[in-house]
Amino acid sequence: MFYSLTGQIIHIEESALAIECHGVAFACAATAHTLRELKPGERATLYTHLNVREDALELFGFATRAELGCFRLLIAVTGVGPKAALALLSAFTPEQLGYFVAAGDAKSITRAQGVGPKLAQRLVLELKDKLPGFGHGPQAGNAPASAILPPDSEALAALLALGYQQAEALLALRGMDDAATTQEKIRHALKNLGGMG
């Protein structure tokens, strides 16, 4: 029904915001990532999803199409409602969640509030073949494991020894300069890992 809303952000609270469009203010539930990107008084565009229930109409707003697309994939999974999908997208970006799913790393997914091991495993199983919807390139779902491994396996081994899961370690090491030393890669990765939760 609504593709997007463009207007002025007039109110932000813990898990929702209000956006005024031509004199009408719409209340939207939103992820922590979206809420951090917006400020009261600024003009913004939100990509929206309308959830229709017997007793209510719920509007969800997202700062990016990738978040909206990921949200729709998540709520299509058995046992994942809008609240659980928001919790997942507040804990992780679509890209981070995509890496965890690709690596079969259900344990990392349980860091999202209210997501237990069974639900995390179901997400991995049901979304494994839908990775392009998480904002990856079109070939992401078919990429061999070697394509996402960092060139320095020593840095990866060090992060695994520190207790990090493989998927989050790979994500943290991504984008490093090949010429960087192993120590530089580890420092870079640990800095990234500090901002993932």
Image (cartoon, grey):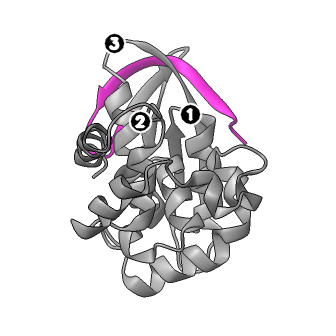
Residue stretch in magenta:
1-17
Tell me the kind of residue under disc 2: Thr
Residue located at (37% from left, 24% from top):
38
Would residue 45 be visible to someone looking at this image?
Answer: yes
Q: Is residue 40 above or below residue 133?
A: above
In the image, is 69 to the left or to the right of 21?
A: right
Tell me the kind of residue under disc 1: Thr
Name the residue carrying label 1: 64
The residue lying furthest to the bottom in this view is 118
Q: Is residue 127 above or below residue 122?
A: above
Name the residue carrying label 3: 41
The local crowd at label 1, few if under 14, some if 14 to 19, many if 20 or more residues have their Cα within 10 Å, is some
Pointer 3 with pointer 2, Cβ within 8 A: no
Q: Secondary structure at mark 2?
A: helix
Would residue 53 be visible to someone looking at this image?
Answer: no
Residue located at (32% from left, 73% from top):
114
**Residue 12 lies within the magenta run:** yes
Q: Position of residue 131 (x, y in %)?
A: 68, 58
Name the residue carrying label 2: 34
Q: Nearer the viewer, residue 173 or 108?
A: 173
Q: Nearer the viewer, residue 87 or 148?
A: 148
Q: CA distance from mark 1 to mark 3?
A: 19 Å
Tell me the kind of residue under disc 3: Gly
Q: Secondary structure at mark 1?
A: loop
